[in-house]
Amino acid sequence: MMTLNLRTDYTSKGTPMKNRVREIILHAVENAFAKGLLKAGTVPEMEIETPRHDHHGDFSSNVAMVSASVQKMAPKKIAQAIVDSIEDPGGIIEKMEIAGPGFINIFLKKSAWYPLLTAIHHKKDAFGRSDLGQGTKVQVEFVSANPTGPLHIGHGRGAAVGDSVGNILAFAGFDVEKEYYINDSGRQIRTLGLSAWLRICEFLGQDINFPETCYQGDYIRDIAREIMDALGDVPCLKPDPSLDPGDNHEAISMCAKFAAEKILRGIREDLSDFGVTFDRWFSEQSLYDAGRVDDVISHYRSLGVIYEKDGALWFATERYGDEKDRVVVRNNGITTYFASDIAYHMDKFHRGFNRVIDVWGADHHGYINRIKASIEAGGGDPDNFNVILVQLVNLLRSGEPVAMSTRSGEFVTLKDIVKEVGRDAARFIFLSRSYDSGLDFDLEVAKQQTSENPVYYVQYVHARICAMLLKACEQSLLTGMDQMEDIPFFTPHLLLLCEPEEMALIKLLASFPHVVEKAAATLHPHVIFTYLMSLASRFHAYYNQHKVITDHRELSLARLFLVSAVKIVIGNALGLLGVSAPERM
RNA sequence: GCCCCCGUAGCUCAGUGGAUAGAGCAUUGGAUUCCUAAUCCAUGUGCGCAAGUUCGAUUCUUGCCGGGGGUACCA
């Protein structure tokens, strides 16, 4: 079974330019049918693609090749018939060539591209938006770390991915809600309470054997002290030599509640410092309190999907493709996490989400099938549930692995990382690779303000352009920073933009909406990263080769118009990744 | 054993059913009287192996090899 069984019924609108070319080609095929150059019929599924190489044109179509079997003609002859039938009322085509095995390569006039720059200035921070999602309600749930300890670097990657996927989907026309699921129920929370309680007893002078299964980190001691300060007068928190500390259930549950709330506040704060906020924090305990878990169990029991065996209750997930059936209530009467997960995911769909996306660590992949099974058994469509599995992060310092052990409590927290390397650098690196691959995160590299660090490479573009706009203002080329965005009253002579580097930049800007759609359709934020790197590279090359502000006033204005369009797109793309676009560096 | 991810340049990784597979780092050599050198330019015998589908496969399928993660009445 595919991990990411994506819905494919979101059709890309493509870029306006690509669509115009598509229409011209399709019209030419119809003409060729009418003229009898080709056998009339339907046009097979064809593509208008952006070729890798400039000398293959601005766009290229494989229509002749995919038509070969139907037409029973050589692709090149079909291509010739189509090219001979082209009509171009808008006059956007410079020339067409038939190349390779039968590609039709289309070269557009430079003038065809200029309106795009105006469009970017009009749309500003909305440039790149689309209605791909058509308002589909989608929930992205991510991080959802248990409130038993601080967030670590793996959570950081999940946070960056989930937040960015949410941003991208919203930009692509989905109605997005971001949610954090709090596992505030169950054994881990009890263990947390026990850990804190034992530390308290230790402080109070009792001889304690601190079990390995308890949380070892120093933060537990800090919390224990806080509990003593805040609740020291509560009777059950007094030492009682006649009672084994592990049996003081009242104290343990009081400590658990206090500790979980304290840790959760820390998590919220760390995420907020990381630039990640949620629309909703959903408590697992609230499902139990509302009886939802029991309801779900009895519901599925009545459907015959949950059955009793060996004193436990089992969910028949194997019927729906899982490896084996799974326990929902153990023979000691305690529910498993799977039970509340079923109720939780049912609740998501009941809340009206048409699509549910969970971001999990890759070590949880075994859960996908059972959750899908529970959705299908409940009459839902498991394809509306997607799991993004985020592979592990290797934390390095100058190429050497940083020792991390959750059990000993010695690990670098997300907070530490953000403090050391900064929010922008951390987020950019987390999103620099596909989450399908493991990620090396080197603290020293992330900290460096040099070319080795991609975040500065991209942010520098934005800062450089801002500096230019400022200079233009000082020279009275522009009357204010807003002037460039005041398009209805001012459009420079864009025909002056005719350098190859300028055309390359404009074409790259034109592809941004398509890049966003691709990122949204595949749920892959690194697509935005890759785009940013190539746009930044194009810009820096242009900057080094051509002066924007020159003695030639009209040319300067046209170039400022171009680079401020670059600034807008860089800003929009960085925003999707949750990275800031500084005005100076 | 079974499941998931990965295998592309010395290293870290993008990418694609098609026409000459890219970037960063590293190496070596260059560029600044000039809008920020956190920059640019030059520099490369690489798609793990083997079958299959296809007009065409690095891309899709299967098998194998190698790395990582999972495989509890744990979370």
Image (cartoon, helix red, strand yellow):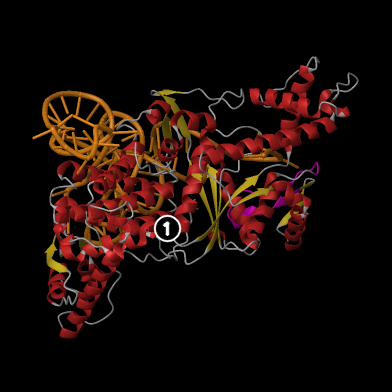
Quadrant in the picture for residue A8: bottom left
Judging from the image, mark 1 belongs to the subunit labelled: A
Q: Which residue is mark 1?
A: A521
* A323 in magenta: yes
Asked if one can make out residue A144 in the rendered structure from this viewpoint, the answer is yes
Q: Horizontally, is A409 left or right of A173 in the view?
A: right
Please state which of residues A205 and A103 is positioned toward the viewer in this rendering.
A205
Q: Horizontally, is A81 left or right of A474 in the view?
A: left
Q: Residue at x 19, y 46 (%)?
A: A542
Q: Residue at x 30, y 56 (%)?
A: A483
Q: Quadrant of the C terminus of chain A?
A: top left
Q: Horizontally, is A400 left or right of A292 in the view?
A: left
Q: Residue at x 61, y 64 (%)?
A: A352
Q: Give above or below for A401 relative to A165.
A: above
Q: Give above or below for A5 relative to A227.
A: below
Q: Which residues are magenta?
A: A313-333
Q: Position of residue A131 (x, y in %)?
A: 43, 65
Q: Position of residue B11 (x, y in %)?
A: 32, 30
Please state which of residues A365 and A450 is positioned toward the viewer in this rendering.
A450
